[in-house]
Image: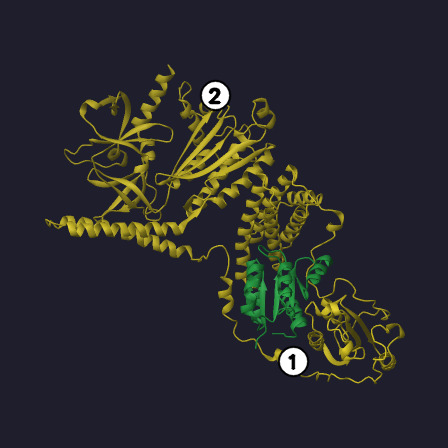
Chain colours: A green, B yellow
């Protein structure tokens, strides 16, 4: 079984970058264009890990985390937030909402895979 | 990172910049809705995010500063006053410029960039300024623990043994972090031994499910640096008790082991609360979790990447405002060509049926009519594919006006109307330069300085209205300013100085205004950096006529000027009048014909040796024989007895003499470019129903070349002058 990633980002560029890296690394990649779609897709995709942007229309990254954690069934899924700054307060806020970790944009392949490794144990 | 992802980025940038412009325009118009501010923030943020991925540092730096100011606005720490809005608008322009440079190459105006950055900085509070954009590194943001005494030696690629004590706090489990996965990540770094410490695990009755009781002792032998080891625990920093101790020699190792054992054997007295009394297991330290074999890879990791899933493509299409399909332009153009042929084919078929001499062709004609309607439907459908709203073009123009205002020290705002009017893609592309020029002119020469405006009782802020609309099969684009209007005495004086008109010429107001389009005309005393550039409005006119359109100006002193551009909806098909001239079939664009009439001898008056004038309802109009103008000779008794009254852009009227009028129909324009050189009087060619090629005439250039028209024009001006 491939590790399933659900990426939620409103930027097509970032989605494409994630897709390219993750598919090459052997992950199963799914994506949503905003927080609302991401939460809606979650049950169908049933991912092993969620990567979400923070600033998005409809539902932002914090909202995604809160909704996923709030549902109970999904309370354990690792959620990585994509942030542009490594601002400590942003990370603290994300973690307060229940984020597992973060990926700082711009990311390189190695750091992305490393982040996934730490929360899923999987390299692919 | 492949080029295609970068292409996607630039495409996305266009959309994001449009969204930014749109939002800022709304804000400028007084809409301070938080969602508008948020949308701009997100757009700029996305540009920054993407730019970072491609190492576009200038863009990242600027977007970051821009975004930070916006963050202040959306956090209500900053008020959107007029000054800030203007700065944001200029910053948005600069962001576009930086995207363009990143995509197409070229130079950044460093000084301008720095000025804007400095101006943005003024709105950023001190502590935020240090929040620099950090390229991704593996090092944690801050030391996660007291590193203690490590001897201070930088890590060398030597094998080192780390003793790690890892005790999660209960909060960690709420974040989805799993110790097991962290250990797997550690195992990638070297040889790992894991031992679970369940000493603090209370008896079942005392167990609180929300509490964290377990701890782990890890021994990692690795050649990796200490920071790499620490990076594994980055996500759980603050969510666990963590100590990482490296030791170089066996003695230290033994001591540490002993210390660890001692510690585990008897929990510190102060920790009584964590270990409920009487329940504290005094059992010797035994590793209950079997340490995974260092060589064995986790099962999940063995599933190697196979073919990338096609699914992502499918997923990518989800959402978004409307499903769209990207098609190469060339394919659409092939289709348009084919539709053009179809229309020609229909004409040919109709012609041949007529030639059959069958008495009753009604049934065939009904079907033929259906064919014609279908062909038109297809044509319109295909044209619609090429049609695009003028909105992006208009938004760019807002930028031009801002730049021009800043450069001239005037204050102008651009009001746009009919942004959703759809126009052929090529028309939009080729309209950009003329519009830019007209707008710069409007700011530079049209709108007065703020103090002059005030003195004239106008608002300090000049208004330039840019509108688009469909008007009877054409597109009408209007640029209207509320400036001083054309300075007619001055325009006339310059025209005389430059020899464009005779010294004593008497011109109507409209004629004077339209002198602006005369080649080589420029009212600027010195070529201003802005609208001058040695290019006159004649270039604008050429660009518009090159698109098969017309441009006109009207002006009211003290009230402003209006430029009107009329363009065909499409470049591929036009309505034309089919006429014959000296046995040749030709097409005259309907748009230029004012009226048609059959002439009789008593309507014709002579002017000078060769010239003739047509008398229409008491007015004289010079006659221009098309055959003569094109150098065609009539056989025997043929006569040009039909007149097409046309009006030029300068308001000059002329009667084009042709032999006969046959039909009025839609024709497919076939460019003569590359087939033959420029023929004066001929704009393009088309194929008629009988399969013959017909020239499409350009009335303007025929009239311009006509000696009668010129003589009459001069005479009229002279007589007006006297």
Image coordinates for residue B640, horizontal then vertical, percent: 20, 32
Q: Earlier in the sequence, mark 1 or mark 2?
A: 1
B73 left or right, relative to B156: left
Image coordinates for residue B168, horizontal then vertical, percent: 76, 71
B635 left or right, relative to A98: left
Circle 1 Cα neighbour tier, 10 Å, few/some/many (<14 / 14–19 / ≥20): some
- Which label sits on residue B298? 1
- Which label sits on residue B372? none
Instruction: Report the Cα–Cα distance between label 1 and label 2.
Output: 88 Å
- Quarter of the picture holding the C terminus of chain B: top left
Image coordinates for residue B652, horizontal then vertical, percent: 34, 27
Residue at horizontal 32 percent and vertical 50 percent from the top: B379
Quadrant in the picture for residue B698: top left
Q: Indicate whether B63 appears above or below B451.
A: below
Give the SS element for disc 2: helix
Q: Chain of mark 1?
A: B
- Quarter of the picture holding the N terminus of chain B: bottom right
Q: Which residue is mark 2?
A: B489
Closest to the observer: A20 or B35? B35
Q: Indicate whether B595 appears above or below B56.
A: above
């Amino acid at each position: 079984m491939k590790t399933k990633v659900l990426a939620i980002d409103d930027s097509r560029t970032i989605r494409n970058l994630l897709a390219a890296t993750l598919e090459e690394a052997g992950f199963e990649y799914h994506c949503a264009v905003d927080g609302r779609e991401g939460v809606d897709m979650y049950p169908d995709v049933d991912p092993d890990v969620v990567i979400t942007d923070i600033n998005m229309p409809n539902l932002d990254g914090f909202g995604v985390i809160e909704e996923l954690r709030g549902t109970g069934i999904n309370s354990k899924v690792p959620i990585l937030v994509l942030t542009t700054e490594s601002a400590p307060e942003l990370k603290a806020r994300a973690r307060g909402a229940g984020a597992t970790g973060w990926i700082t944009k711009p990311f390189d392949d190695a750091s992305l895979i490393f982040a996934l490794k730490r929360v899923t144990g999987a390299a692919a | 990172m492949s080029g295609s992802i970068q292409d996607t980025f630039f495409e996305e940038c266009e959309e994001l910049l449009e969204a930014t412009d749109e939002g800022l325009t709304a804000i400028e118009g007084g809409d301070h809705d938080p969602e508008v501010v948020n949308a701009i923030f997100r757009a700029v943020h996305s540009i920054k995010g993407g730019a970072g991925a491609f190492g576009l540092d200038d863009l990242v730096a600027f977007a970051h500063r821009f975004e930070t100011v916006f963050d202040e606005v959306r956090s209500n720490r900053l008020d959107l006053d007029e000054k800030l809005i203007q700065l944001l608008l200029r910053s948005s322009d600069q962001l576009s410029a930086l995207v363009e440079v990143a995509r197409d190459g070229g130079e950044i105006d460093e000084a301008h960039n720095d000025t804007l950055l400095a101006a943005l900085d003024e709105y950023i509070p001190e502590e935020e300024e240090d929040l620099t954009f950090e390229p991704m590194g593996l090092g944690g943001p801050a030391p996660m623990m007291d590193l203690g005494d490590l001897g201070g030696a930088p890590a060398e690629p030597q094998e080192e043994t780390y003793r790690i004590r890892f005790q999660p706090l209960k909060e960690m489990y709420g974040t989805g972090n799993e110790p097991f996965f962290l250990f797997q990540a550690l195992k990638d770094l070297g040889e790992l031994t894991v031992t679970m410490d369940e000493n603090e695990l209370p008896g079942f009755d005392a167990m609180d499910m929300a509490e964290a009781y377990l701890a782990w002792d890890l021994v990692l032998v690795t050649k990796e640096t200490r920071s790499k080891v620490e990076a594994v625990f980055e996500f759980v920093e603050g969510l666990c008790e963590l100590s990482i101790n490296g030791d170089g020699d066996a003695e230290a190792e033994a001591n540490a082991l002993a210390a660890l054992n001692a510690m585990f054997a008897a929990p510190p007295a102060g920790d009584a609360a964590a270990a409920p009394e009487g329940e504290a297991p005094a059992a010797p330290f035994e590793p209950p979790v079997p340490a995974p074999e260092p060589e064995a890879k986790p099962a999940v990791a063995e599933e190697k990447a196979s073919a990338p899933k096609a699914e992502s493509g499918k997923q990518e299409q989800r959402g978004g405002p409307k499903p769209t399909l990207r098609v190469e332009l060339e394919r659409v153009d092939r289709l348009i060509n084919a539709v053009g042929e179809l229309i020609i084919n229909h004409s040919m078929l109709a012609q041949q049926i007529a030639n059959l001499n069958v008495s009753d062709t009604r049934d065939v004609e009904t079907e033929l009519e259906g064919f014609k309607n279908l062909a038109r439907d297809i044509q319109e459908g295909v044209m619609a594919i090429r049609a695009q709203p003028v909105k992006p073009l208009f938004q760019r123009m807002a930028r031009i006006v801002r730049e021009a205002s800043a450069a001239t020290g005037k204050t102008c705002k651009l009001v746009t109307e009919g942004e959703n009017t759809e126009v052929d893609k090529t028309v939009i592309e080729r309209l950009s330069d003329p519009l830019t020029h007209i707008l710069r002119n409007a700011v530079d020469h049209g709108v007065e300085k703020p103090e002059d405006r005030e003195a004239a009782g106008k608002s300090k802020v000049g208004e330039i209205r840019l509108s688009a609309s469909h008007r009877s099969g054409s597109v009408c684009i209007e640029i209207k300013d509320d400036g001083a209007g054309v300075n007619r005495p001055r325009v006339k004086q310059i025209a005389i100085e430059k020899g464009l008109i005779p010294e004593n010429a008497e011109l109507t107001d409209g004629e004077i205004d339209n002198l602006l389009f005369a080649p080589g005309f420029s009212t600027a005393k010195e070529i201003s950096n802005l609208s001058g550039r040695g290019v006159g409005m004649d270039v604008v006119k050429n660009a518009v006529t090159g698109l098969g359109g017309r441009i006109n100006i009207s002006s009211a002193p003290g009230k402003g000027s209006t430029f009107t551009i009329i363009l065909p909806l499409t470049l591929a098909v036009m309505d034309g009048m089919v006429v014959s001239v000296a046995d040749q079939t030709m097409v005259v664009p309907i748009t230029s014909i004012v009226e048609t009439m059959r002439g009789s001898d008593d309507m014709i008056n002579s002017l000078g040796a060769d010239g003739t004038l047509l008398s229409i309802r008491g007015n004289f109009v010079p006659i221009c024989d098309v055959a003569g103008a094109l150098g065609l000779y009539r056989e025997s008794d043929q006569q040009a007895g039909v007149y097409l009254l046309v009006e030029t852009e300068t308001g000059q009227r002329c009667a084009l003499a042709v032999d006969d009028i046959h039909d009025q129909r839609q024709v497919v324009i076939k460019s003569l470019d590359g087939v033959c050189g420029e023929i004066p009087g001929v704009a393009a060619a088309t194929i008629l129903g009988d399969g013959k090629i017909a020239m499409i005439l350009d009335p303007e250039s025929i009239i311009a070349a006509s000696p009668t028209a010129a003589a009459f024009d001069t005479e009229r001006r002279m007589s007006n002058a006297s």
